[in-house]
Amino acid sequence: MNAPTTTANEDLFAYPQDRACPWQPSPGYQDLGRQGPLHRVRLWDGRWIWMVTGHSQARRLLADPRMSADRSRDDFPAVLPRLDAPIFKPIAIIGFDPPVHDVHRRLLAPDFSLKQVRAMRPRVEDLARRLVADMLQAGPPVDLVEAYALPIPSMVISELLGVPYDDHEFFEAKTVGLLQAKSAEDAERAGRELWDYLDGLITRKEREPGGAGVLSRLAGEVDEDGDLTREDLLRIALALLIGGHDTTSQMIALGVVTLLEHPGQLAALRADPDVLPAAVDELLRLVSITDVSGVRVATEDIEIDGEVIRAGEGVLVSSSMTNRDPGVFPRPYEFDVHRTRGGNAASGRQHLTFGFGIHQCLGQNLARMELEVAFSVLFEGIPGLRLGVPLEALPSRSGGTMQGVHTLPVEW
Amino acid sequence: MKVTADRSRCMAAGHCAISAPDVFDHGEDGLVVVLDTEPGEERRREVELAEDLCPSRAIAILRTAAVAGPPDAGTPDTPDTASAG
């Protein structure tokens, strides 16, 4: 339908572009943001889509039922070559529209609720303290990704889902293989290995009912004629396992980098632990770890602020840029843990790092809790923490949208 | 003010229970529960925040006929009173 590959597209801004600083959007996006809220950008396959950098436009579009998240549609844009892999096409929850989306989301709501997350907190604190003790015993230098940032969310999601943590090296490597693949073929290969692994795990849970974790519970609720087929469950397991550890681990890593590079802000956080929840949302806003709040395709013509998004046109909402809309966030490029001082700490939740609309991140409260615990336990346990290499030498991910570092060498 | 929450729209994001914990909570199913359907004016700012943050537009503040002026006239009367409380 859409996807015109005319020569005119070649003049458009090429998306995505790498960051020059780990916590700031690519310089090219910053230029776009200054020009207005809506832009046409060109993708790897020659197709153009809308890129949204305005906060209000983003919220309206992400909450608009005429915008589809259905990745199995032919007109749904593949923002990167790897996202063309069949395994991504019907990805559970994030890639479905109502009513299927709402049914699956509600099935999982109790497991990710605030109450559940609060109940998990003491165990996550114990885990973080154990990891810090291990690092202190090993001595510097340490790769903080491997020793701390990855094990926390990886163990937490394993326990929550009922996936054996003993298999973590396998599922962590395959997740990176899937999310960082250079081609659709490589992504598909890694994704299928995860799929087969989860298929075997769910088969074991079906044979031995009553085990712990979300997947054990849902394995008992599978009904091929009802709301949850076995294939649905496998898709949900895959989405939760992937979504549950990679983003959070990289947010811990880049959050630590951002704090270490802003000693005044780190000192302010240490001086007043009550600032922690607002500081976490400020870091989520600033770092915008996925860089994208959501990708959609319009199912009808949608008029927005003088522009018309036609049916069949793709839309990508930039989290890093909507999180810097000066109309919502004064001094938007500054890191300020006191941004919400005087107001309700929850007002720091206006960023779009977790998206908006019905697809807003299912695990957001779990992620916030893990981040609060990770930062507070780390800087309490290792007050002299510092980067082990210059900022410019950090091995950053490139060529995609998901931000992160391959390793994070630290000393103390 | 009168507050409603539509459980059929709720996606259990939890912003309302964080923004206005005396007004909103959630049940065992994770979905919103209204604790106080007619909170006092001193809660207006936090309830408006809950309404604004709700990603699935499940929360609504009903502007009754008794309130003079258009629905968006609520903003100017909040800053000083809310920061004092």
Image (cartoon, coloured by chain):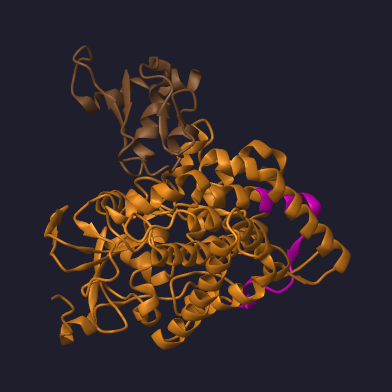
Chain colours: A orange, B brown
Q: Which residue corresponds to the image point at 35% horizontal and 37% vertical from the top-left?
A: B52
Magenta region includes residue A190: no
- The vertical placement of A258 against A20, above or below, is above
What residue is rendered at 49% in x and 27% in y? B21
Q: Position of residue A167 (x, y in %)?
A: 66, 72
Q: Is residue A180 visible?
A: no
Tell me the quadrant of the picture where the C terminus of chain A can be found: bottom right
In the picture as drawn, the residue positioned furthest to the front comes out as: A207
Residue A89, position in %: x, y? 33, 73
Between B60 and A277, the one nearer to me in the picture: B60
Residue A7 found in image quarter = bottom left
Residues shaded magenta: A373-395
Q: Is residue B37 above or below residue A243?
A: above
Picture coordinates of residue A130, whole percent (x, y):
80, 56
Q: Nearer the viewer, residue A141 or A125?
A: A125
Q: Residue at x 27, y 53 (%)?
A: A98
Quarter of the N terminus of chain A within the rendering: bottom left
Q: Is residue A229 visible?
A: yes
